[in-house]
Amino acid sequence: MICYFFKNFAFNIFVLIKQYFMKFIAIISLALVIFSCESKKPSADQEFLDSLQSLTADAPALSEEVISDIIQQIPSPLEISYLLKDAGTRYDAGMLNHPDNVSKYNSNFKKALNLGIFGTDLGYANIYEQNQDALSFLNVIKSLADDLNIGQFFDFGTIKRLASNSRNLDSLLMITTQNFNQINSYLQNNRRSNLSVLILTGGWLEALHITCQVAKQNPENEDLIEKIGEQKIILDNIKLLLEFYVKDPYIADLHEQMLEMDRIFSQIEIIHTYKEPSFEEVNGILVVKDNSSTSINITQENVDDIRQIVLEIRKKIIS
Amino acid sequence: MKIIFKIFAIVTFAIFLKPDVVQAQCNAEALATSCISNLQDGFTFLKTFKVDGQSGAKKKVEYSYVFSKDTQYYLSICCKNEGTDGIVVTMYDSKRHIVSTNFNNGKFYAGLIYPCNATGIYYITFTFNNSQAHCGGSVLGFKR
């Protein structure tokens, strides 16, 4: 009996030790993997920080949280591309950045901004099902993303396969959006939000540029003019984001240009009227009736001024 | 750096040794990603949101986004099982007026369509009403 008890006890102890030992091995492996990943990071981060002379490493944790909150507010440039297509406007590759320009971008500052610009161009080409152009943009995006050590987030094989067939549009837009979202969260988690801010700024500026150019060709289209006026809200966020990094001379210069743009946007008035919403159920889904509204007071002169300043800022970035 | 690494290794080790903690972990990211397939036809994917109430310790998870006039947004909530597990999403405008919610007339809806009529910054707030897991994910899509 005693012998059985000791045997059983010893067996249980053995099982327990074995379980913990396995867990221990698993943890050690995990720790080694994490450590090996960590050990690679400083060179990439340092390279970026050196080139940008940014102070992100010293930024307080709260600032990073605030930055993340603001970054995630910025709407996808795809929303504007859909507006342009729905407005019946034609695809115009001449408005977009030329993929050949990629060889001009030697600093990480320009690479990040132009990654955002080409990202918007890719979305625009995709929505208009311009597969050949989309593939060209994809190649330069890959090159810029690799240079910035974030190429691993793009599933280029899958994207290229989807881009070759216009029937895959939904999947294509989903995967590219997901990849950009993953980049943003990776950069924010690794205290490289400055890079994220530049990518978003480039993407937003390009969407505004395209809208301004299309509005010029379609001056009667009030939706486009209103959309330009609405960008006042986004510009407020962009200014705020850049402000975090104004100690960097490149970003300070870009921030100054945005302030100039803001002087034009400050003449535009957005009036918001709130009214309580109502609800109805349709096929098990709750459909809201939004009774609120906005009206935007913007003149043709404002639109012309915005178009001009966007052209000037963009020219400095893409050339 | 080494000290941080050591602390991290010890904490991770301790967490892994406590089976009850492992079971309580919330994989909000996986739930949010799986939620993408819930997007209604015609809606283009925009974002996922992680909803981790940290087993009830966190009462509110909040995000914000600029919604555009004349655009319809679809927001879906996913949790481990069917339904919303008491997860309530409420959307507010920049002045904190309620513009939308998935909890209406005592019923939780896993999906809601919000046709935006006023461009601006909106807050997307997730709270928990008798939730078991306090854990979920959400996806946002749009169409014009």
Image (spheres, coloured by chain):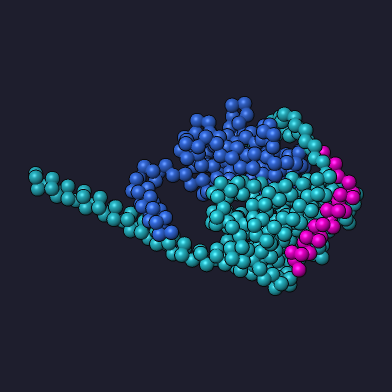
Chain colours: A cyan, B blue
Is B26 rendered above or below residue A178?
Answer: above
Is residue B70 inside the magenta stretch?
Answer: no
Count numbered badges in the picture. 0
Is residue A312 inside the magenta stretch?
Answer: yes
Q: Residue at x 59, y 66 (%)?
A: A50
Evaluate whether residue A225 shows in this view. Answer: yes
Is B80 rendered above or below residue A139?
Answer: above
Q: Residue at x 68, y 40 (%)?
A: B122
Q: Position of residue A101 (x, y in %)?
A: 73, 71
The rendered magenta stretch, by its main secondary structure, is classed as: helix
Q: Indicate left or right for A246 with B2 as reference.
A: right
Q: Position of residue A206 (x, y in %)?
A: 75, 58
* Residue extending furthest toward the top: B105
Q: Residue at x 21, y 50 (%)?
A: A13
Is A216 rendered above or below residue B83?
Answer: below
> Which image quarter is the C terminus of chain A in?
bottom right
The quarter of the displayed image where residue A292 is located: top right
The quarter of the displayed image where residue A269 is located: top right
Work out whether residue A160 or residue A57 is closer to the camera in this orientation and state it: A57
Q: Position of residue A129 (x, y in %)?
A: 74, 61
Q: Residue at x 43, y 62 (%)?
A: A35
> Where are the magenta residues, as a range?
A295-319
Evaluate whether residue A169 shows in this view. Answer: no
